[in-house]
Image: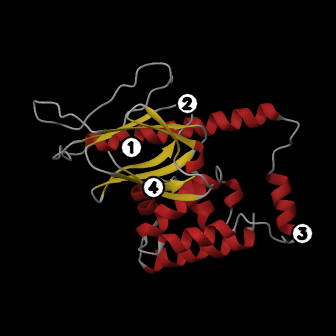
Amino acid sequence: MDLELARSLGEKLKNVREEKGLPLKKIEEETFISLRYLKALEEGRWNELPGKAYILGYIKKYSRLLDLDENEIVTQAKQVFTETRLSSKDKEETASLSLPAARPKSHFFQRILIYLVVLAAFFAVLFVVFSLPSFTSIPSFSQPTETEAPTEPVATTSLPQPEETPQFALHLLLLPEDMAWVEITHQTQTVFQGVLVPGKQYLFKANTPLTLSGVNGSQVRVQINGEDAGYLSVAEGDFSRTINP
């Protein structure tokens, strides 16, 4: 990881934020990224963040909030993870923060802690969403529902619908094998945005095309109307894909 490039990009985001008069607390409320992670992002301490997929997702949401070209900023962020010549100081910092390979148990507990943080954030978002005043639902589209065990039936929770339940032409099921950041839009409206967690299932229903974009789609298996459709993307990194009924 190129820590110097990370510091430069973090400083750029910080300068734009300060020019717009936005405090970090406001960024935290709008993006649901913790204040601790936002400070590490701006100060270039990216080696203290959960991982590449998370960082690119954070950068995308942050730059969008600042009205920056999110694709350009994400492209610059990817360069931080390319092989570079680090200074001796950066090498020492990276080495001191790396977990020893001979201690897999510590690594296991670290992953468990990350999962717990993600779950806590997810339930916090649910609390905020269901605390808002009721709103008119999107015609012929239902929100996704997660289940803990893949072998159990997938339960779905739909947005408020008329008395007659509509029939959906598209049933899209996402099965992440590793963490991935995904944004789903339906007729130009964002209906889902967040991190997909391994071991959970995400079901979407619609009668019109769904557009999916994000990071690490090569780790998310797809089922369309009950049939295996491979993975969201073939290559690692950013992806964008439209799925029709």
Which residue is tagged 4?
A: 241
Q: Quadrant of residue 179?
A: top right
Q: Quadrant of the C terminus?
A: top left
The type of residue carrying mark 2 is Gly
> Which numbered disc, 3 or 4, marks the residue that appears first in the sequence?
3
Distance (Cα) linking label 1 and label 2: 20 Å
Q: Which residue is mark 1?
A: 125
Residue lying at 68% horizontally and 62% vertically, measured from the top left? 45
Three-letter amino acid code at the position of disc 3? Ser
Residue 199 image label: 2
Kindly report the distance in space between the C-alpha atoms of the residues bearing marks 4 and 1. Answer: 25 Å
- State the residue at coordinates (17%, 31%): 165
Q: Position of residue 240 (x, y in %)?
A: 47, 58
How far apart are labels 2 and 3 at the CA level? 40 Å
Q: Which mark is residue 88?
A: 3
Please tell me which of labels 1 and 2 falls first in the chain. Answer: 1
